[in-house]
Image (tube, rainbow, N blue to C red):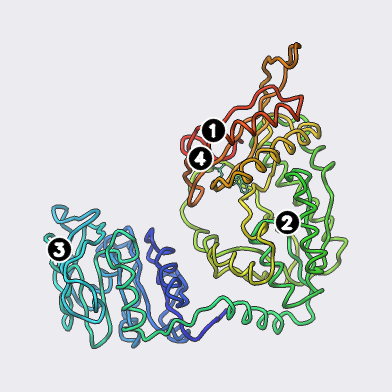
Amino acid sequence: MQQTQEKILVLDFGGQYNQLIARRVREQKVYAEILPYNRTSVEEIRRAGYRGIIFTGGPNSVYDESSPHFDPAVIDAGIPILGICYGDQLLAQMAGGEIRSAAECSEYGRTPLELRRCELFEGIPEKIVCWMSHTDQVSTPPSGFEVIASTSNCRCAAICDEKRKLYGVQFHPEVTHTEHGSEILRNFLFRVCGCSADWRMDDFIENAVEQYRRELDGKRALLALSGGVDSSVAAALLHRAIGENLVCVFVDHGLMRKDEGDFVEHTFKDRFGVNFIRVNAEQRFLDRLTGLTDPEKKRKAIGEEFIRVFEDEARKLGKIDILVQGTIYPDVVESGRGDASTIKSHHNVGGLPAVMDFERIVEPLAELFKDEVREVGTKLGLPDALVHRQPFPGPGLAVRIIGEVTRPKLELLREADAIFRSELEGAGCPSDQYFAVLTDLRSVGVKGDARTYGRTVVLRAVTTDDFMTAEWTKLPLSVLESASSRITNELPEIARVVYDITSKPPATVEWE
Ligand code: XMP
């Protein structure tokens, strides 16, 4: 989808910072998209009318046969290029320069850098500290290029051919450790590429609504709504475009937190008037979970049952042309990458039956990062509680009940969880995700003068940027105290409350 006339291509050679580069460009209100080097041609790049191209870093050496390469015609396409790290070496090699691998000259981390005058470094002090991470480096710049920055170990730390608007930097301007890094990127965008900062969320919404109104005219579309941020924003956007031709199916597996299913239904049905079907499937899921105690078996059973319920609903709806999914940009970029070992089988509502017959899949948020998705949600009028909802696992409370899942246990956990959340939120404590877990552990207690033998609830709160790693949140003791006291007073079955002080790794955020 083309949002704007002005866009920058981030050509991905496998570097770990590709998303960060795109993010930094968008922060300057210039639209950026990431394309993999091996699925993009120079013709496509020319046709798409990019204002500039950024070659990302990559883990390889340009002289490896198997390392990523690109059609050298790109440097004569008349489009400004900024190569970063591997991208700098690749640009130099394509233009006829030489690269050398010298372990003794490798640089990692903060490195002093001296700059010379050029468009890219306009307004930046001559001496800065940059972030380096390389072994190879450009040893001889291509003809027509000059050296515009050096470090003590790397003479060609930046090169340029100002006439052709080709720039290469060995360091990483996209990371915050590089001083004036965002100014360097700004110089590339505005001085070199002539961008004018026209990327606005309102344009995104307007263009997307207009586009889908046109393309999906007269078609019926189905969206599996989980109540999470992404599928909710996708629903609100598509509803604005095609109105009642959008059917949202919300499978309530009965494993939601207290009042959550009603909140989702109320938001979409009453507030937006969306064609909304809530399937109350609690009994089906509970039947399926009977006797299961192994976490992976529980997760798989829920994923499969979800598909069965969905198939049954879809059959009732008759022919549907379009499937709408709330896929967001990081999902697109990450998919198909490597083969990380399975820590847990993640179940997402996107996991729909492969056999379902759709003419087309529409992913209206596939170009946006999470914070951009939230911004769109707010602009579309979704309530804050939904837009800023903390992540909730697809299998819901089933992975927060240790052992077999039963209705009484679900009810107990829902109450304990609601108390903890209200105490934490009432005290205004910042934490990225927080919840209660119901364990199978029983312990002896005393209430009044009588002995009790009740269950143990665990409170968990984590602080994290990306949920790949997480710290346990240092909650004020007063919050823990009031949560513990309310839970044991209001829920007689609970004899003990404990706080989880394990970070990820070695633990995971969820208990199962
Ligand atoms: P873990 O437990 O893997 O959780 O450290 C990291 C983040 O992912 C969420 N999570 C899930 N989300 N389907 C999801 O959509 C799942 O099956 C699932 N399991 C965990 C978890 O809540 C945390 O935010």
Question: Residue 41: image x %, image y %?
Answer: 43, 78
User: Residue tagged by mark 4?
Assistant: 473
Between circles 4 and 2, the one closer to the viewer is 4
User: Residue tagged by mark 1?
Assistant: 477
* Kind of residue indicated by mark 3: Thr
User: Residue tagged by mark 3?
Assistant: 151
| Relative height, residue 354 to residue 34 (above, below) | above
**Residue 248 in which image quadrant:** bottom right
Query: Which residue appears at 79% of the width and 42% of the height?
Result: 285
Few, some or many C-alpha atoms within 10 Å of disc 4 (few <14, some 14-19, many ≥20)?
many
| Relative height, residue 460 to residue 333 (above, below) | above
Residues under numbered marks 4 and 2 in contact, where contact means CB atoms less than 8 Å apart: no
Q: Earlier in the sequence, mark 4 or mark 3?
A: 3
- Direction from residue 433 to residue 275 in the image, left or right: right
Quadrant including the C terminus: top right
Query: Which residue appears at 45% of the width and 80% of the height?
Result: 7
- Find the distance from the CA under tag 4 to the CA under tag 2: 38 Å
Between circles 1 and 4, the one closer to the viewer is 1
Between circles 4 and 3, the one closer to the viewer is 4
Label 1 C-beta lies within 8 Å of the nearest ligand 1 atom: no
